[in-house]
Image (tube, grey):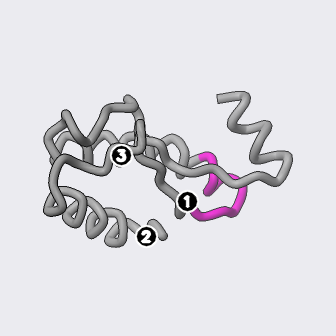
Amino acid sequence: MSLLKAWLDAGLELGNHSFSHHSLNSTALSDYEADVLRGEEITGGLMTERGKTLRYFRHPFLHTGRTIETRDQFESFLRAHGYT
């Protein structure tokens, strides 16, 4: 946490990378979304403390899901939660 705070204090912006770093290719979508929200609590909280808004997400391993449907559903989830 101290490293994340130092980055923010240096003027950098954080993004969500999930809490547990699971692959969407091997995790149920509902579990993956819950893990993203858990990561959002921490990262988003640090951003909010400094007057910033969490808006970025990066997939662990760059895995965006095994199917186009999974990818599209998760992208809708991200948009609904304010990610760009």
Left or right placement of residue 40 versus residue 8 in this view = left
- Circle 2 — which element? loop
23 is higher (above) or lower (below) than 14: above
What residue would you read off at disc 3? 36
Query: Earlier along the polypeptide chain: callout 2 or callout 3?
Result: 3
Q: Nearer the viewer, residue 63 or 31?
A: 63
Left or right placement of residue 44 versus residue 69 in this view = right
- Name the amino acid type tagged 1: Leu
What residue would you read off at disc 1? 54
- Residue plotted at (19% across, 64% down): 73
Q: Which residues are magenta?
A: 46-54
Picture quarter with the N terminus: top right
80 is higher (above) or lower (below) than 59: below
- Residue plotted at (59% across, 64% down): 53
Q: Is 15 inside the magenta-drawn segment?
A: no
Q: Is the residue under label 2 in contact with that under label 1 (CB below 8 Å)?
A: yes
- Circle 1 — which element? loop
Q: Residue furthest front?
A: 67
User: In x, y percent, where is residue 25?
Assistant: 22, 40
Query: Earlier along the polypeptide chain: callout 1 or callout 2?
Result: 1
- Name the amino acid type tagged 3: Val
User: In x, y percent, where is residue 77?
Assistant: 27, 64
Graded by Cα atoms within 10 Å as few (under 14), some (14 to 19) or many (20 or more), the crowding at tag 3 reads: many
Distance Cα–Cα, label 1 vs label 3: 12 Å
Q: Residue furthest right?
A: 10
Q: Is 52 inside the magenta-drawn segment?
A: yes
Q: Nearer the viewer, residue 82 or 73?
A: 73
User: In x, y percent, where is residue 19?
Assistant: 41, 34
What residue would you read off at disc 2? 82
